[in-house]
């Protein structure tokens, strides 16, 4: 397993970039603007290829995020998303979003921290029972 990124919601993108880039010395590794969703994702790291911080900025929102609301999720790259989700499910861990696409799943830690699992390399072919599961919150 490889740690990929931590997501943090930010209300003032310029101030956040000033803090992380200017003051902490991180570099912007990539940026994704999603006009239809009205948000931007800015990835920062200490160096290319290192674990990143994903700043999520919702356009037009000056909402002050409370502690807990500003933190989004941890993300890990995994070798076999289906096998890992089966192992987690067998251990009684809640799978909030099953890996029906063969690429991504979300689970919750015991402390309710959202953890994103991303398939390493290409997405896997659809596999039962995952491909027919819905997002009901627990499996």
Image: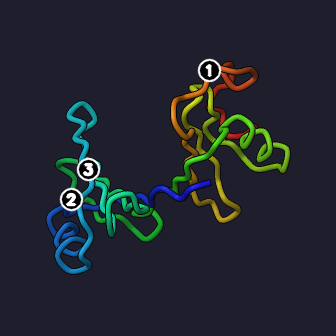
Please name which of the two marks, 3 or 2, marks the residue nearer to the observer. 3
Q: Which residue occupies 19% across, 63% down?
A: 12
Q: Position of residue 95 (x, y in %)?
A: 68, 42
In this picture, residue 83 sits left or right of residue 108: right
Q: In the structure shown, which secondary structural element does the residue marked by tag 1 occupy?
A: loop
Specify the quadrant of the image occupied by residue 127: top right
Crowd class of label 3 (few under 14; some 14 to 19; many from 20; radius 10 Å): few
Q: Nearer the viewer, residue 10 or 42?
A: 42
The residue wearing badge 2 is 62
Which badge, 1 or 3, is on the more N-terminal residue?
3
- In the image, 41 versus 134, the foreground residue is 41
92 versus 138 height, above or below: below
Q: Distance from label 1 to label 3 (Cα)?
A: 28 Å
Residue furthest to the right in view is 90
Quadrant of the rendered image containing residue 36: top left
Q: For residue 53, which numbered disc appears in the image? A: none
Q: Which scheme is used to colour this image of the protein?
A: rainbow
Residue 19: horizontal and vertical position, in percent? 22, 75
Q: Quadrant of residue 109?
A: bottom right
Q: Quadrant of the N terminus?
A: bottom right
Which of the numbered marks, if any, corresponds to residue 30? Answer: 3
Q: Which numbered disc flags the more N-terminal residue, 3 or 2?
A: 3
Assess whether mark 1 and mark 2 are in contact (beta carbons under 8 angstroms): no
Residue 45's x, y, as percent?
Answer: 33, 64
Helix, strand or loop status at disc 2: loop
Real-space CA distance between mark 3 and mark 2, rounded to the nearest whole angstrom? 23 Å
Q: Residues within 10 Å of mark 1 (few under 14, many from 20)?
A: few
Mark 2 vs 1, N-terminal side: 2
- The residue where tag 1 is placed is 125
């Amino acid at each position: 397993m490889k740690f990929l990124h931590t997501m943090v919601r930010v209300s003032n993108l310029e101030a956040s970039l000033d803090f992380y880039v200017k003051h902490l010395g991180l570099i912007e590794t990539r940026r994704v603007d999603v006009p239809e969703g009205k948000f931007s994702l800015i990835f920062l790291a200490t160096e290319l290829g290192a674990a990143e911080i994903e700043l999520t900025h919702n356009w037009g929102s000056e909402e002050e995020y409370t502690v807990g609301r500003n933190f989004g999720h941890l993300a890990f790259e995994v070798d076999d998303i289906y096998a890992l989700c089966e192992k987690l499910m067998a251990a009684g861990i809640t799978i909030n979003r099953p890996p029906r696409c063969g690429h991504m799943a979300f689970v919750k830690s015991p402390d309710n921290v959202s953890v994103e699992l991303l398939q390493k390399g290409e997405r896997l072919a659809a596999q039962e029972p995952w491909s027919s599961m819905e997002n009901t919150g627990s499996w």
